[in-house]
Image (cartoon, rainbow, N blue to C red):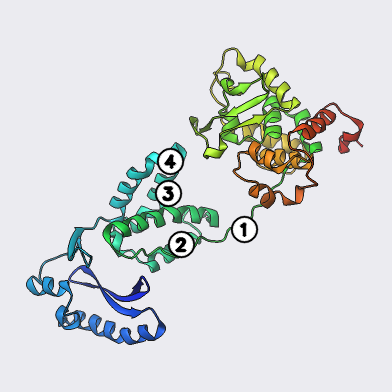
Amino acid sequence: MGSLRQRNGLLFFDFRYQGVRCREQTTLPDTPGNRRKLEPILARIEQSIKLGTFKYADFFPGSPRAEVFRDDPAVDKRRTVLDNSPAGLQGRDIPNFKTFALTWYEENEIRWRRSYRKMMLRTMELHLYPRFGEYQVNEIDRSMILKFRSWLGREQPDGKVLSPVRINHIMTPLKMILSEASERFGFSNPAVNIKALKVPRSDVHPFSLDEVKLFLANVRADFRDYYTVRFFTGLRTGEIDGLQWKYVDFDNRLILVRETIVDGVLDITKTPGSVREVWMSTPVFEALKNQFQATGKANRFVFCNRKGNPLRHRDITKRVWYPTLARLGLERRTPYQTRHTAATLWLGAGENPEWIAKQMGHATTHMLFTVYSRFVPNLTRKDGSAFERLMISAMKGDDDATDSRAC
């Protein structure tokens, strides 16, 4: 069915004739009044095509397509798009969505981390190909995209309901692919101005210092160093699981974040800003010194299994993290909350937000004030010394930092 669409603010007819998508530009601005003027003309075009009486030159006498259809009206041009351009009439083969998506992926994969490439392929195969794969890229319109997004928001065949975040992640490559295709094949991008779904701000649930002390005092001894480093450095899961001894600088008390591990494979860090040097507080310094006695002499990775391979975080979470929380009666939280805990403890100690942002691998302090605003006290320090004093006092059992659970 034909439609009225706009390009650069001007209306054009968009319809199919003899298997060819035809677009005829007008000089009328896209206003409600002009749409009402053109709608009867579009209706006559559609009706005459159905009756078999449509003559291109009767409606668009100056169009190059009028000559094409007059000379050879029976030719099947289903795989060809004809478009006006500064160079005149052009005919180009239009691939289907799956074919073009694969081309687009191959052209861009060099820019992406391995884990992002894997996620992109999975999204295309599970969601985009089944819905759009066989359509020519220029056949996909705005209505199809919006219906697809609405379908993603409903309960899926496996019973799951996708979150707005996940739906946005699925829509992103679809928009990117169609944007590139529209540039190459000269059609209007149907995904323009389709905005991402609003995502509710996720709340953080950091541990209090008392809870951290309780957890570390009761977790399995062979994982105490691991969780000490997690709680007091803010390292991401892939960063600590992929930490190698060559990146531990005891002399300068720094952890050099240079690589991360995803699905058991080392990769570059999440973002360029994630490459950083993380300061070792005394608890972290002592935990790594202790860990060196266990794995530092014969293993590449700081935290590893008996075979020297990196820890599998999902297994550790199920076998150690959640059971410890349950045994202590602590709120069930993901291990990622250790990162939030480090940030809030630094803020609570009065460290400078710019210093904290660098420790966390953030480019600016915006994230700190957005996510942790309620944890920000008066800002007094900028070098980690305030946190150092807090840690030494707390970990040595100073009376002022006594565990409230013992009172």
Q: CA gap, disc 2 to disc 1?
A: 18 Å
Q: Amino acid at mark 2?
A: Arg
Q: Position of residue 100 (x, y in %)?
A: 29, 52
Which residue is identified by label 4?
112
Say few, some or many: other residues with alpha carbon within 10 Å of mark 2 (under 14 / 14 to 19 / 20 or more): some
Say few, some or many: other residues with alpha carbon within 10 Å of mark 4 (under 14 / 14 to 19 / 20 or more): few
Which residue is identified by label 2?
149
Say few, some or many: other residues with alpha carbon within 10 Å of mark 3 (under 14 / 14 to 19 / 20 or more): some
Q: Which is closer to the viewer, label 4 or label 3?
A: 4
Count of marks overlaid on the render: 4
Marks 4 & 1, CB-CB < 8 Å contact: no
Residue that appears at 73% across and 42% down? 344
User: Where, by quadrant of the figure, is residue 218 drawn?
Assistant: top right
Query: Quick one: quadrant of the N terminus?
Result: bottom left
Q: Is residue 345 left or right of residue 92?
A: right
Q: CA gap, disc 3 to disc 2?
A: 14 Å
Q: Position of residue 400 (x, y in %)?
A: 90, 34
Residue that appears at 57% across and 23% down? 244
Q: Position of residue 333 (x, y in %)?
A: 68, 43
Q: Which mark is residue 123?
A: 3
Position of 214 relative to 251 (above/below): below
Marks 3 & 2, CB-CB < 8 Å contact: no
Which residue is identified by label 1?
200
Q: Which is closer to the viewer, label 4 or label 1?
A: 4
Q: Amino acid at mark 4?
A: Trp
